[in-house]
Image: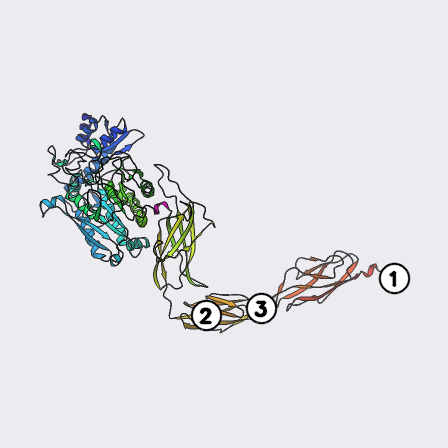
């Protein structure tokens, strides 16, 4: 094994002398116990359960640890080549001495300009706060370990707060969302992903309806760099994972391996997995948990900010989240802490973003026992994983962890606590990050932001998306728009277990009021196919704008599925802007006539907005009113009442000629074969012994008619009187007379003449 590694190292790209040699390896494990023991030494391993193989990038010490646990280790040459390529890119960029800027113009990591440095991230925060002081503030959390040792070094930890600050004081209980980025320093993507989510919220506020309502009604607290001391080292030396505490985390064999794994240092269930199965007590190990729980300034800052002050019973006060769950801080066993489930009306969400493994994880991580809120946690996890296409799993599925952020926040506070592991590399290429990772995971974060009001309930209902409205139109009841949307219950990742989906029961729209707010008035939307009976429905409806003030309004759409029976389960809403035009002070109604008739008044009428006008509609002789429309109002002949008028309109009266039947009498008909034609049309056959006839259909007033005989009985001659003329009423006076043909008459003297 060592010869293989040496040969690969010689063939690899040039590396910095201070950097320990790393390889990407595959290790075959005999059973799940061996997997758990081996994986406890690493934060991130990818597991192929079908092949019983774990994959990890590590150094020789890590390889030795895998082999000590009885795993067979082999180098993944393709993965290692990618790792060497990353190292070479970093080295070349650093040797060039050129100033590196991110794609947004902020200080970037050499060779990987899509990722901002700590300074670039902090500058972004400052710029967002300066440009958008109405919705952005910066919260100071406290110093990093390095700064506690020397005030001239290290960093002040910071959180970016994004919410409508003008209304925050009057809405102190608005739902909150906390995101940690890059608590493990070498994971480049999480800090940048969290930063771009912040930029999406801030830069789209006021122009995008989703970003606008999320910021107005929720409170986002984003810790973009959760381990800035360590991250600064990782920007140049790549493999730094832990913080830089060289006292508590002193590693005698290698200073580069020192420090504390902050994601094993959180107080809830710290060191609870037996036999060091969830973290390590070895200061040189990647998962060293620290000498005591919450030993590190970074951990203390983050816990104080999010949870506040917590006692040994797990009761917390003074943090971002309210404490909604009871459960001891230090139970006697990791098989479950005996704590109750958080109530299903719990608001908010916590997530810690990592790389790499392509996973969406929820508690518990220190036991295979289900969390008290297991069902809604799993439902939410499968929703999130639909957007990024990662595997949704309980956190302990691959191997146990203790003292981690997600278990800590859920266990202490009851808020849903999650971890997302992005992509497949610590040092993800900018091409894949920009092309897919950032957008897919921002979409997942946007989804959960829409669910913050009831994070344990709303994911059980359908999602609403594709919401659009038509241009403002004028109807009989005033201005309106037509709204369309999709209500979809299918958006679950079904790769790890099956999530039931349900038919859509209903969909509603709400103007300027969230569905759950007091006074919310639903406007029922209809299924486009006429019936709600599928788990995905296109819906539409008319949104009346009368009575709304001119200007921008927001319309929320929420679907309901059949889960739970009865009234069903509402899902996550979304929104669209509707701009109500300013009503003019003066409006004009212009009469227009089509056909033979009149309207009085006949000239355009300019009146104050809101006025009602009347028009007398008079058809000409032989005419009737076909339609009157174009202005809001009603028609009761002969008066059209238009108004109240709030915009210019053209009132069109369409007149149509009256229609009349054509017919007459028949005399002397004794046989069959008589046929008549109207204006050369299809002949009308007249029955034997008929005394009257009438053509089917009608002719309009003022048109001409001409009735002719097209056939007659063989022994009779027929004539027409009054067979042509102009239609001015129903024609009934046409007379057809039939008599024997003269050539067939036998006179009294016996001779034909």
Residue depicted at x 44% and y 63%? 477
Q: Position of residue 598 (x, y in %)?
A: 53, 72
**Residue tagged by mark 2?**
590
Residue 52 appears in the picture as rendered = yes
Q: Give the mark, 1 or 2, whose residue is nearer the N terminus.
A: 2
**Residue tagged by mark 3?**
623
**Residue tagged by mark 1?**
747
Residue 418: say if magenta. no
Q: Secondary structure at mark 3?
A: strand
Q: CA distance from mark 1 to mark 2?
A: 77 Å
Quadrant of the image occupied by residue 483 = bottom left
Q: Position of residue 685 (x, y in %)?
A: 71, 57
Image quarter hosting the N terminus:
top left
Position of 710 relative to 267 (above/below): below
Q: Give the mark, 3 or 1, whose residue is nearer the N terminus.
A: 3
Q: Position of residue 99 (x, y in %)?
A: 16, 47
Q: Secondary structure at mark 1?
A: loop
Give the left or right position of residue 658, taking residue 140 as reference: right
């Amino acid at each position: 094994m060592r010869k293989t590694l040496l040969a690969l190292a010689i063939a690899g790209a040039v590396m910095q002398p201070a950097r320990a040699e790393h390889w990407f390896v595959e290790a075959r494990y005999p059973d799940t116990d061996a997997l758990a023991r081996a994986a406890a030494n690493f934060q991130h391993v990818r597991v192929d359960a079908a092949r019983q193989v774990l994959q990890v990038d590590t150094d020789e010490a890590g390889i030795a640890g895998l082999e000590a646990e009885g795993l067979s280790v082999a180098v993944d040459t393709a993965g290692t080549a990618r790792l060497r390529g990353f190292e070479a890119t970093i080295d070349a960029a650093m040797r060039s001495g050129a100033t590196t800027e991110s794609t947004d113009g902020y200080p970037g990591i050499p060779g990987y300009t899509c990722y901002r440095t700590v300074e670039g991230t902090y500058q972004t925060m400052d710029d967002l706060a300066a440009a958008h002081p109405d919705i952005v503030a910066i919260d100071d959390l406290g110093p990093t370990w390095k700064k506690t040792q020397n005030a001239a070094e290290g960093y002040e930890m910071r959180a970016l707060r994004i919410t409508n600050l003008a209304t925050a004081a009057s809405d102190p209980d608005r739902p909150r969302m906390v995101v940690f980025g890059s608590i493990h320093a070498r994971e480049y993507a999480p800090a940048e992903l969290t930063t771009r989510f912040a930029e999406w919220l801030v830069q789209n506020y006021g122009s995008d309806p989703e970003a606008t309502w999320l910021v107005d009604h929720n409170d986002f607290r984003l810790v973009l760099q959760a381990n800035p001391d360590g991250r600064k080292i990782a920007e140049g030396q790549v493999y730094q994972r832990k913080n830089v505490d060289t006292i508590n985390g002193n590693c005698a064999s290698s200073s580069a391996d020192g420090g504390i794994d902050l994601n094993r240092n959180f107080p809830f269930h710290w060191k609870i997995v037996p036999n060091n199965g969830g973290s390590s007590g070895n200061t040189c190990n990647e998962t060293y948990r620290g000498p005591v729980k919450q030993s590190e300034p970074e951990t203390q800052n983050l816990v104080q900010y999010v949870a506040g002050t917590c006692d040994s019973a797990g009761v917390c006060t003074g943090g971002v989240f309210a404490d909604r769950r009871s459960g001891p801080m230090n139970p006697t066993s990791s098989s479950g802490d005996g704590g109750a489930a958080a109530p299903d009306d719990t608001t908010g969400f916590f997530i810690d973003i990592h790389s790499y493994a392509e996973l969406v994880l929820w508690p518990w991580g220190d036991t295979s026992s289900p969390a008290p809120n297991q069902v809604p946690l799993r439902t939410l996890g499968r929703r999130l994983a639909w957007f990024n296409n990662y595997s949704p799993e309980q956190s302990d599925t691959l191997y146990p962890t203790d003292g981690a952020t997600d278990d800590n926040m859920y266990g202490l506070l009851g808020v849903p606590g999650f971890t997302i592991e992005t992509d497949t590399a610590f040092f993800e290429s900018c091409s894949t990050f920009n092309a897919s990772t950032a957008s897919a995971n921002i979409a997942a974060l946007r989804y959960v932001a829409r669910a913050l009001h009831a994070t344990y309930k709303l994911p059980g209902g359908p999602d609403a998306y594709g919401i659009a409205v038509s241009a403002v139109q004028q109807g009989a009841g005033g201005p309106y728009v037509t709204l369309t949307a999709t209500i979809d219950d299918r958006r679950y990742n079904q790769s790890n277990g099956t999530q039931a989906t349900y038919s859509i029961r209903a969909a509603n729209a709400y103007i300027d009021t969230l569905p759950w707010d007091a006074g919310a008035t639903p406007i029922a939307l209809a299924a486009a196919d006429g019936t709600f009976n599928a788990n995905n429905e296109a819906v539409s409806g008319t949104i009346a704008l009368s009575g709304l003030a001119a200007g921008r309004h927001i319309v929320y759409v929420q679907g309901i599925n059949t889960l739970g029976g009865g009234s069903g389960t509402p899902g996550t809403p979304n929104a669209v802007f509707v701009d109500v035009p300013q009503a003019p002070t003066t409006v004009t109604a212009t009469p227009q006539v089509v056909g033979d008739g009149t309207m009085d008044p006949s000239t355009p009428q300019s009146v104050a907005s809101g006025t009602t006008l009347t028009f007398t509609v008079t058809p000409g002789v032989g005419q009737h009113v076909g339609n009157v429309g174009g202005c809001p109002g009603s028609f009761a002949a002969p008066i059209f009442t238009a108004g109240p008028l709030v915009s210019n309109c053209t009132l069109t009266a369409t007149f149509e000629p009256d229609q009349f039947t054509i017919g007459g009498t028949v005399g002397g008909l004794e046989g069959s074969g008589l046929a008549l034609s109207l204006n050369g049309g299809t002949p009308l056959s007249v029955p034997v012994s008929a005394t009257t006839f009438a053509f089917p259909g009608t002719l309009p007033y003022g048109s001409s008619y001409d009735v002719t005989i097209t056939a007659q009985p063989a022994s009779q001659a027929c004539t027409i009187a009054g067979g042509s003329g102009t239609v001015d009423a129903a024609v009934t006076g046409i007379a057809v007379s039939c008599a024997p043909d003269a050539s067939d008459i036998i006179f009294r003297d016996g001779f034909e003449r």
